[in-house]
Image (cartoon, rainbow, N blue to C red):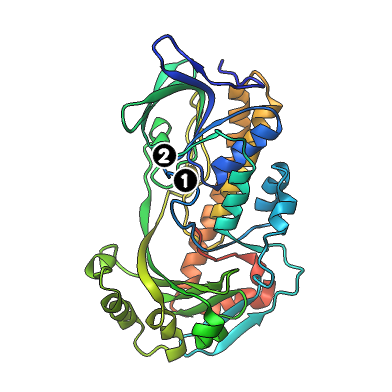
């Protein structure tokens, strides 16, 4: 039986291989929350992250943090008040337009919604700053892992280093290295591709686009494509141009030539209102292509001693229900709390965690797939308008997230 001690200072074997009772691969939102919850309860985790530092790359756009998942996790981590202090006021406003620029649905942010928006970078910095010095091993690229028996694993790092651990947690995203210990599943293309653009200081430099997007989230939709955009806390606009297309569509666009790339993307939007085309035509900086992948709905495995996954590593899904970041957060918090609740019995903790996580993930992945079909259906945006009119915009986040 593998165990997680109440304190977990790393040790070094006679062969100079470091040993960490709890090792987490990936310092995304889920891995960070797990490390924080364990720290709050006196259990130290070693967190291995590929990035060289917290500032190594931008962290994407806004996230809507749900009151029944992401916010629950932040409360468990003792960071809820810090989260509230960083919320983007007005960010829950929602607009739905058709391809002609006509407003088909609009709801203001009246402050009563349960899904406040926060910049992903701000949330990650809050989590990173809550951890003790040295918990995160920056610049650590995991290249593989193998079982040693009795729930222990050896993990190899780029450059030839390695360590052993009693509990290995793969929080390493869509293309997880740890997942192979549990499953042979891999992400598949969903049929939708994004091109991301930014319009900074929108009210001053891009007033037409600022008016189109409004204060929160915009859905401008037509059959098989559309613009999904949101206003960021710094006053800029982040836009996801979405196209239902073959996987190779993006390969035919030269993204090193920004103006040529804009023209290529906008050819898919001939006949759309000029104010919507401007979300790409007037964008500043490089265009960023991204294919949307997902793991199979209901992905799971039989219990394997000493290892588990959280977040996108286990349930990567399309972003069309706004669940990805929220699931990573609640996964991390619930795994941490399960380990604390089963001192000395890691397997019981992992079994309890996975039972709840699998069920939750399957529901959300199915919802995400259904939302994607609705957003880009032949009658779009009518399906979304009908749903929002009947139930309000909080029935689905539908805001892209990493």
Q: Position of 309 compared to 131: left or right? A: left
**Image spot of residue 64 (x, y percent):** 62, 62
Alpha-carbon distance for marks 1 and 2?
7 Å
**Residue marked by disc 2:** 139
**Residue 147, disc:** none
Task: Name the element at disc 2.
Answer: loop
Q: Nearer the viewer, residue 200 or 60?
A: 200
Query: Which image quarter is the N terminus in?
Result: top right
Identify the residue at horizontal 38%, vertical 24% (top origin).
162
Task: Name the element at disc 1.
Answer: loop
**Residue marked by disc 1:** 53
Could you say which quadrant of the image residue 216 lies in? bottom right
Identify the residue at horizontal 63%, vertical 19% (top origin).
5
Could you say which quadrant of the image residue 111 lies in? bottom right
| CB under 8 Å between discs 1 and 2 | yes
Identify the residue at horizontal 45%, vertical 20% (top origin).
18
Q: Nearer the viewer, residue 230 or 370?
A: 230
């Amino acid at each position: 039986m593998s165990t997680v001690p109440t304190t977990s200072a790393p040790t070094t074997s006679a062969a100079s291989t470091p040993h960490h009772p709890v090792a987490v691969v990936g310092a995304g939102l889920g891995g960070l929350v797990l490390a924080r919850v364990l720290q709050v309860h006196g259990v130290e985790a070693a967190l291995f992250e590929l990035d060289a530092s917290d500032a190594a790359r931008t962290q994407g756009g806004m996230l809507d943090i749900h009151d029944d998942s992401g916010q629950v996790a932040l409360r468990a981590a003792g960071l809820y008040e810090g989260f509230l202090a960083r919320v983007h006021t007005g960010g829950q406003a929602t607009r739905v337009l058709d391809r002609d620029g006509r407003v088909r649905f609009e709801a203001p942010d009246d402050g009563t919604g349960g899904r406040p928006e926060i910049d992903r970078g701000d949330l990650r910095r809050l989590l990173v700053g809550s951890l003790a010095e040295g918990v995160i091993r920056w610049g650590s690229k995991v290249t593989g892992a193998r079982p040693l028996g009795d729930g222990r694993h050896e993990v190899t790092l780029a450059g030839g280093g390695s360590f052993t651990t009693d509990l290995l947690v793969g929080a390493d995203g869509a293309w997880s290295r740890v997942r192979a210990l549990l499953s042979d599943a891999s992400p598949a293309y969903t049929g939708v591709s994004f091109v991301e653009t930014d319009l900074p200081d929108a009210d001053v430099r891009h007033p037409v686009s600022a008016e189109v997007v409004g204060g929160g989230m915009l859905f401008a939709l037509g059959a098989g494509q559309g613009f999904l955009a949101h206003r960021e806390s710094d006053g800029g606009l982040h836009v996801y141009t979405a196209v239902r297309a073959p996987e190779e569509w993006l390969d035919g666009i030269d993204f090193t030539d920004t103006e040529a790339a804009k023209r290529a993307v906008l050819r898919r939007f001939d006949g759309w209102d000029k104010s919507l085309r401007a979300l790409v035509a007037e964008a500043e900086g490089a265009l960023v292509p991204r294919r949307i992948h997902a793991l199979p709905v209901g992905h799971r495995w039989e219990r394997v001693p000493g290892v588990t996954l959280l977040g996108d590593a286990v349930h990567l899904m399309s972003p069309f229900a706004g669940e990805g970041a929220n699931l990573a957060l609640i996964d991390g918090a619930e795994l941490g709390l399960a380990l604390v609740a089963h001192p000395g019995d890691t397997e019981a903790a992992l079994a309890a965690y996975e039972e709840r996580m699998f069920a939750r993930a399957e529901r959300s992945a199915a919802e995400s797939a259904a939302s994607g079909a609705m957003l880009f259906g032949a009658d779009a945006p009518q399906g979304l308008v009908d749903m929002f009119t009947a139930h309000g915009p909080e029935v689905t986040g539908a805001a892209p997230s990493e």
